[in-house]
Amino acid sequence: MRTKLPPQKLYLGLAVVLVIVLGILWQTGVLSGQGGRADYQAVFLSNNQVYFGKLSNAASQYPVLKDIYYLQVTQVLQPADPNAPQQQLNLVKLGGELHGPKDEMRINRDQILFVEDLKPDSQVVTAIESFKQGQ
């Protein structure tokens, strides 16, 4: 024979479950605005390379980075203006290199120094959006 729980205990149990579910949703970014959106991260590696893209499975030993871009430094050999910078920075989309990589990278977590979330109005995100519109 089953005993009936008093309504107070039932409501308390439901409240505890609700708080736990909300906490999980907040931690995963669904409620904090970090999940579901197309946010970009800067991933700094131990070889001094920085990649920009959408990072997933961050807790895994091999997080996955997609929609990847990186900075390329170009030396200006003979600038028209002697006061102009001697180097130019270009944002490059991964995939056009000689070896033709896919636009997905599995990175050994041990090689990641740190990850930064990029603001939607950052220069890098603005350049990425401009690149995508020009395709």
Image (cartoon, helix red, strand yellow):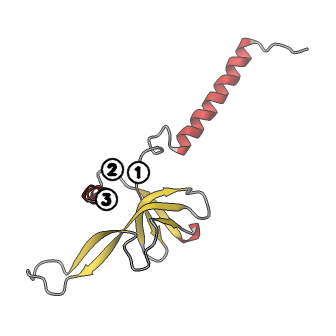
Residue at 91% x, 14% y: name it: 1
Q: Is residue 90 left or right of residue 33?
A: left
- The residue pinned by badge 2 equals 120
- Residue at image location 46% in from the left, 68% down from the top: 102
Q: Residue at x 42, y 45 (%)?
A: 37
Front disc: 2 or 3: 3
Q: Return the x and y of residue 39 as percentages of the image width and height.
A: 41, 51
| Residue 7 appears left or right of 108 | right
Look at the numbered disc 3 and give the secondary structure of its residue. Answer: helix
Q: Position of residue 74 (x, y in %)?
A: 26, 79
Depth check: give the residue in front, 33 or 91: 91
Give the structural element (helix, strand or loop) at label 1: loop
Mark 3 Cα-neighbour bin, 10 Å: few <14, some 14–19, many ≥20? many
Seen at 31% across and 60% down, the residue is 124
Figure check: 39 above or below 106: above
Q: Tell me which numbered mark, 1 or 2, is placed earlier along the sequence.
A: 1
User: What kind of residue is marked 2?
Assistant: Pro
> Hey, what amino acid is under mark 1?
Asp
Q: What's the amino acid at mark 3?
A: Ile
Residue hosting label 1? 39
Q: Which residue is mark 3?
A: 128
User: Considering only order in the chain, which callout, 3 or 2, is on the residue closer to the N terminus?
Assistant: 2
Q: Quadrant of residue 25?
A: top right
Pointers 1 and 2 in contact (CB under 8 A)? Answer: yes
Quadrant of res 108 = bottom right
User: Which label sits in the foreground, 1 or 3?
Assistant: 3
Q: Up-down: is 85 above or below 14?
A: below
